[in-house]
Image (cartoon, coloured by chain):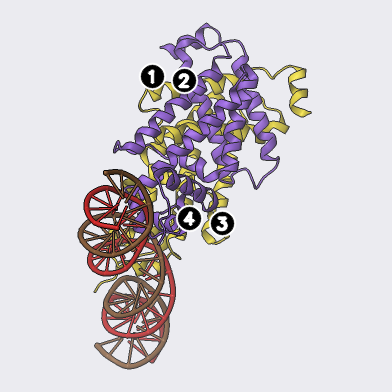
Chain colours: A purple, B yellow, C brown, D red
Amino acid sequence: MPRAGLSLDRVASAGADLADEAGFGAVTVSVLARRLGVRTPSLYTYVEGNADLRVRIAALALEESADLVTAALSGRRGSAALAAYADAWRDFARRHPGRYDATRQPVPETGGAGSTSMIAAGRRHADLARDVLSGYRIAPTEQTHAIRLLGSLVHGYVSLELAGSFAHSEPSSESSWHYTIAQLDRWLASPPPPEEGRRATAG
Amino acid sequence: MPRAGLSLDRVASAGADLADEAGFGAVTVSVLARRLGVRTPSLYTYVEGNADLRVRIAALALEESADLVTAALSGRRGSAALAAYADAWRDFARRHPGRYDATRQPVPETGGAGSTSMIAAGRRHADLARDVLSGYRIAPTEQTHAIRLLGSLVHGYVSLELAGSFAHSEPSSESSWHYTIAQLDRWLASPPPPEEGRRATAG
DNA sequence: TCAGGTTGCCTAATAGTGTTAGGCAACCTA
DNA sequence: TAGGTTGCCTAACACTATTAGGCAACCTGA
């Protein structure tokens, strides 16, 4: 019997494809083994089990999305960079819903090899967000706050949209998306708040 | 042998407690049956299976959170209402992480009794967000956009925080949360954009 | 108080999944 | 082409999801 030619990369990649087609929740070693044309226990050579498989897919998806966002940001600054960043994430989520869901998985406490990859890719993403915000006047002490705000808004919107929360009412999610990103751009570009507002935040 | 005195409400409620303790992903009919002191098949009298159980928990959690948000908003308007709304959600997520995760579940396509409850509770939540925003000057045509923006920001932040995304870097998530809500309040309260900005959005 | 019906929870049974242990043969190396 | 390595296999076990059908605990009416 010829060998299937598996590898950790092929397993993770096939797992990501499966997630996109059937949902990240449907990814299991047994279903993936069937899709790869091998018996279930064969996958245990490459991943430690179901949990590890999901972490590997998450790490893969985080790196792929980081590549896409990096490409989208190339040569752009300010408003253009913000829109490119947000659209890159949304496009990724729509084209690869399973991969996107994988990126939303919490990093497991047990620090295995997969979780190390996830943390590294997570740092890449934080740097990308920082790049986007470097095009706006933001006080250094508020940098991290702003990164978290940007991530919350983009991922909040994309997650809710992907879950169908905006599908059953008017107006179209498309128009709300443009509104949301245009508002954030306008707000970030607007002059900083007056003294007393800042004191309240600092104190 | 005495009867356990089960009911759909008791099953869903126990399932929600289990989700809070072990994670929403760990909720299964068999684990829940053990916790309730009955055999697994006994639960099939009350829920149609694993998927239905999760939907019932989601519906319960959506109603409980709607009650909490409603109470938090009572008597408040404007900035105070916004902060109360956001804090109510965040507190709910921190006290009941499993219930919160349940509310993030997409409504199933198959319109059973559970999904009907989810949709009804979802409408309640949309109305609550509308109440919060009624304290700000927002153009009627932008109402729904703003509701979606508010929901995206709050749930994006709360989800990322719950997943531990902000746990491994400075400054504290607590301070970023205050920054985020204070910024949103400031932005919503700021005067509307000039003519040309509005034309760009409309065109 | 007890006979009869209802029904809540049970056991039994089947199919499938997660995981470990150990074997055989396909492939690489000399 | 012989020998070692290792990729994928079968076998096995525990557990979960789900269906079918049974017994007895409870309610009702006389």
Q: Position of residue A28 (x, y in %)?
A: 41, 54
Q: Nearer the viewer, mark 2 or mark 3?
A: 2
Residue assigned mark 4:
B55
Residue A155: x percent and y percent? 53, 34
Looking at the image, which residue is at 41% across and 32% down? B161
2 and 4 marks in contact (CB < 8 Å): no
* SS state under label 3: helix
> Disc 2 residue type?
His
Cβ–Cβ under 8 Å for marks 3 and 1: no
Mark nearer the viewer, 4 or 3: 4
Amino acid carrying mark 3 in the image: Thr
Relative to A169, B108 lies left or right = left
- Which quadrant would residue A106 be assigned to in this image? top left
Q: Residues within 10 Å of mark 2 (few under 14, many from 20)?
A: many
Separation of disc 4 and disc 3 at Cα?
A: 10 Å
Disc 4 is attached to a residue of which chain? B
Which residue corresponds to mark 1?
B171
* Circles 2 and 3 on the same subunit: no
Sequence-first disc among 3 and 1: 3
Secondary structure beneath label 1:
loop
**Mark 3 or mark 1, whichever is nearer to me:** 1
Q: How many marks?
A: 4
Amino acid found under the numbered disc labelled 4: Val
Mark 2 and mark 3: Cα distance apart in space? 38 Å
The label on residue B116 is 3
Instruction: Give the Cα distance between marks 3 and 1.
Output: 42 Å
Residue identifier under label 2: A145
Considering only vertical position in the picture, is B202 above or below A46?
above
Do the residues bearing badges 1 and 2 touch, measured as CB atoms within 8 Å? yes
Q: Residues within 10 Å of mark 4 (few under 14, many from 20)?
A: many
